[in-house]
Image (cartoon, helix red, strand yellow):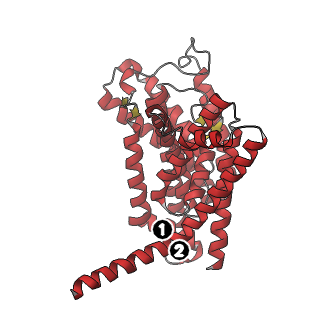
């Protein structure tokens, strides 16, 4: 009897501690969502739209049909990769604003290698892993440029990664219009179709890249929380001077961190080319006119320090994007209204989180 009472008391105290830890987060997200949706409702009413219909369409379009859910997952997958590409260097307090460019470059190199090997008739079991490795190395190498510039020349990676985005844009444009790669029948700048053995395929309408995305979540969580590199990343993020004084190699950690972040963005680009479009085309890393790198930054700011929360953040962002697309098609509501909602949510979360941290 005494043991049972002790176990019950222990469970209650554990529940109370869990609730007390979760309460600040609930306050932050609850306040941000309430205020943001309230403002969007007011703007919708002022523009003459039906507020209940706008909110219902925005929130539930992803769940009204299987097609809506599939669209949401398809958007979530590349967004997850660009989010982690920003998230990992941000743990060191260095900001990789070039995830979009790394995704573009990874996708471009994947398409180039696939088309160059088209006449070799390689089987899928050989070609697909080769293209995945190509995407990883291309994105990582592209991000490594910014890491090297910071490590050896102290050039702010925010500046270098943003500038490199434009280099990647030009690379995509070049390969989409270059002789030997260009699809002459396309009305949009794009390459020829990749070999059929390069296609990953779908299961139930869900791209197989979903499996690699799920694996990435586990790998990143282990990297950040269970490895020496993750410890070094966190240590430098907390106090770079103290970390170096205790023997952490700042240059090595910085370069590895940028390579790993860029590799994930490149992998996301390669998977989009192989699994969704089956070719390289201009704009493949954009959603509703907004580039995936910027959305990845927003998703990172929402989750704060928790790598396991990234998939949830990406999925919710994708829900809003699918709802925005349906709003534009069915009610002619400007998609920019949803971009405003996303920006407000992130801004309020960041401000509220900072205010609560300052009070502790």
Please say whether residue 270 is visible from this viewpoint: no
- Residue 128, compared with residue 262, is above or below; it is above
Query: Badges 1 and 2: C-beta atoms under 8 Å apart?
Result: yes
Residue at image location 48% in from the left, 57% down from the top: 309
Across and down, in percent, residue 330 comes to 63, 29
- Please name whichever residue, 3 or 339, is drawn nearer the observer in this view of the structure: 3
91 displayed left or right of 222: right
Any mark on residue 246, and which?
A: none
Outermost residue, top direction?
A: 185
Any mark on residue 243, and which?
A: 2
246 displayed left or right of 27: left
Across and down, in percent, residue 314 comes to 52, 48
Across and down, in percent, residue 195 comes to 40, 21
Residue at image location 50% in from the left, 25% down from the top: 279
Across and down, in percent, residue 265 comes to 52, 44
Q: Decide which of tag 1 and tag 2 comes sooner along the chain.
A: 1
Residue at image location 56% in from the left, 11% down from the top: 185
- Residue 192, compared with residue 262, is above or below; it is above
- Name the quadrant containing residue 350: bottom right
Q: Which residue is mark 1?
A: 232
Regarding mark 2 in the picture, which secondary structure is present there?
helix
Label 1 to label 2: alpha-carbon separation: 8 Å
């Amino acid at each position: 009897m005494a043991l049972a009472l002790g176990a019950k008391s222990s469970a209650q105290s554990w529940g109370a501690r869990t609730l007390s830890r979760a309460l600040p987060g609930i306050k932050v997200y609850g306040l941000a969502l309430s205020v943001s949706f309230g403002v969007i409702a007011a703007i919708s009413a002022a523009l003459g739209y039906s507020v209940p219909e706008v909110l219902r369409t925005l929130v539930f379009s992803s769940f009204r049909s299987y097609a809506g859910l599939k669209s949401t997952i398809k958007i979530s997958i590349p967004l997850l990769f660009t989010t982690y590409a920003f998230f990992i260097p941000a743990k060191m307090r260095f900001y990789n604003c070039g995830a979009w460019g790394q995704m573009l470059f990874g996708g471009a190199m994947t398409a180039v290698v696939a088309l160059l090997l088209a006449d070799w008739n390689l089987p899928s079991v050989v070609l697909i892993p080769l293209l995945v490795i190509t995407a990883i190395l291309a994105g990582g190498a592209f991000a490594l440029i910014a890491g090297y510039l910071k490590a050896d020349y102290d050039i702010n990676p925010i500046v270098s990664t943003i500038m490199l985005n434009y280099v990647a844009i030009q690379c995509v444009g070049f390969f989409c219009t270059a002789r030997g790669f260009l699809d002459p029948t396309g009305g949009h700048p794009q390459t020829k179709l990749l070999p059929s053995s390069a296609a990953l395929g779908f299961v139930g309408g869900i791209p197989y890249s979903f499996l690699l995305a799920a694996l990435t979540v586990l790998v990143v969580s282990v990297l950040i929380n269970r490895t020496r590199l993750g410890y070094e990343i966190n240590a430098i993020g907390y106090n770079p001077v103290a970390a170096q004084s205790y023997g952490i190699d700042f240059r090595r950690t910085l370069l590895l961190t940028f390579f790993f972040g860029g590799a994930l963005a490149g992998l996301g680009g390669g998977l989009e080319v192989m699994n969704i479009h089956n070719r390289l085309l201009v704009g493949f890393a954009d959603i509703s006119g907004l580039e995936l790198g910027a959305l990845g930054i927003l998703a990172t700011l929402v989750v704060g320090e928790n790598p396991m929360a990234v998939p949830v953040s990406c999925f919710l962002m994708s829900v809003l994007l699918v709802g925005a697309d349906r709003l534009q098609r069915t009610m002619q509501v400007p998609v920019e209204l949803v971009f405003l909602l996303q920006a407000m949510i992130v801004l309020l979360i960041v401000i509220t989180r900072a205010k609560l941290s300052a009070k502790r």
